[in-house]
Image (tube, rainbow, N blue to C red):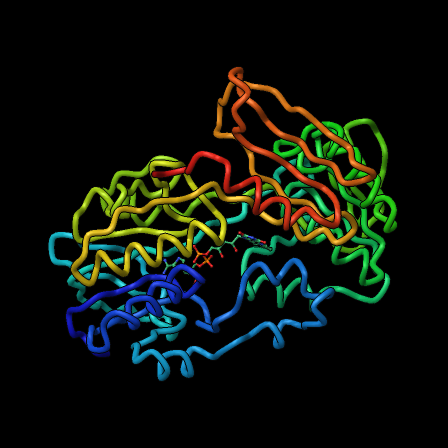
Amino acid sequence: MDDRPGLVIVGSGLGGYGLARELRRRDAKMAITVVTADGGEAYTKPMLSAAFALGKDPAGLVQKSAAALAAELSLQVMTHHRVEAIHRDRRRLVLRRPDEGRGEIGYEKLVLALGADPRPYRVEGSAGAGLFTVNDLEDYRAWRAALRPGARLLLIGAGLIGCEFANDLATAGFAVTLVDPAPWPLGRLLPPELGAALAAALRGIGITLHLGRSVAAFAPGLARLDDGTEVAFDRGLSAIGLVPRTGLAAAAGLAVGRGILVDRLLRSSDPAIFALGDCAETEAGPLPFIAPLLAETKALAATLTGTDTPLTLPALPVVVKTPALPTVVCPPPPGADGHWRVEDAGGALTARFVGHDDSLLGFALCGPQAAAEARKLAATLPPLLS
Ligand SMILES: Cc1cc2nc3c(=O)[nH]c(=O)nc-3n(C[C@H](O)[C@H](O)[C@H](O)COP(=O)(O)OP(=O)(O)OC[C@H]3O[C@@H](n4cnc5c(N)ncnc54)[C@H](O)[C@@H]3O)c2cc1C
């Protein structure tokens, strides 16, 4: 094991590899090691919930092997190595190796790009219900391997990821049932009019929606909803949210909140340790999306190569991959005071969230022009971090 002290990045997702790529653009010589618990294949995670539409199986989603990326970017990539502890006093990481033995490596600077864990769905019988969660390529491999043509699929959670999977799986010919306690899909992101339109579009491609309902209990192959409805299913997927991976950082004594707390330079409470992506909590809160992640990789690469660069973020619309009804959301800041104003222009729905002084604070759009319109509206919103 090469033990040169240099920059060590933990995690090979879009955060870890994205940072490595940005660093290489700026510095051809810096010693960079990527340590990752998984196989280190480079893939674009958002494609997981659109893979059928893209005509991709799990192997087709792999863009590069760890070895190819290591060669291209002159990295040392240690796959299937899980970091178990950070000894900040000695600047060393304790690793569990693929042979289950333990090892250590040193670091001069450390970047945590650890991602997040799916929130477990726990009700009576859930432990034996064989529920899947999909937050990475390995999860997706297992999920796809379990699908049989025409299977009845129960999806729990009609947030961004649940709606995207539901759309993709229904279009691929599966019998999809989607359950969520909110009265409409994307309940926290859309006002009722747009929620109703999305619900209608999802029903229109054959999805059975149980809204305002939760799964109260499971029996083998059966989910019982809180209104007594029984849903028979072959495979279940839970998509009820993600929890940033903070355990490693907390055990090492770093400050954590909802994520690993970082300042505008993405520096944790230890100046030698940085964090970005789904595991981090910036001044704007946890931001588990691609656009902030890309901004973070650029800013941090500049900082780590000698130019302190505080993170700045414009307003960040998120495109929801529901071809049944193209939708873009750009929610107002948490706790913002204001109300939704909805316009319907022949099926193209625009919802503006406006403050009391009539200023635009957020928006949501449904319809074929949503993505193009979102770019225009986003440009008029205040930045998330200026
Ligand atoms: C299905 C799906 C669809 C999505 N679609 C969109 C979209 O359309 N638009 C959008 O903006 N965002 C989307 N997102 C969110 C976006 O993909 C994520 O915010 C982003 O990919 C997170 O990247 P990351 O590098 O922070 O984490 P991850 O990609 O999760 O990477 C974490 C890495 O850390 C490693 N790791 C963790 N713990 C350890 C350890 N102890 N030791 C060693 N290695 C460790 C893991 O093995 C992994 O390599 C989607 C997410 C999902 C799940």
Residue 169 relative to residue 90: left or right: right
Image: 139 above or below 324: below
Image: 300 above or below 80: above
Image: 29 above or below 375: below
Which quadrant holds residue 8? bottom left
Most extreme residue toward the left is 89
Which quadrant holds residue 149? bottom right
Question: Residue at left 78%, top 53%?
Answer: 153
Question: Residue at left 64%, top 41%?
Answer: 159
In the rendering, at what x and y percent does residue 189 appear? Answer: 62, 34
Residue 248 relative to residue 273: left or right: right
Question: Residue at left 57%, top 39%?
Answer: 377
Count of numbered circles in the view: 0
In the rendering, at what x and y percent does residue 87 appear? Answer: 18, 54
Residue 239 relative to residue 366: left or right: left
The quadrant in which the C terminus is found is top left
Q: For residue 130, say whether it is visible.
A: no
In the rendering, at what x and y percent does residue 45 appear? Answer: 54, 61
The quadrant in which the N terminus is found is bottom left
Image: 272 above or below 377: below
Question: In the depicted view, which residue is nearer to us: 272 or 363?
Answer: 363
Most extreme residue toward the top is 356
Question: In the depicted view, which residue is nearer to us: 287 or 148?
Answer: 287
In the rendering, at what x and y percent does residue 283 appear? Answer: 34, 36
Q: For residue 223, say whether it is visible.
A: yes
Question: In the depicted view, which residue is nearer to us: 116 or 284?
Answer: 284
Question: Residue at left 11%, top 58%?
Answer: 90
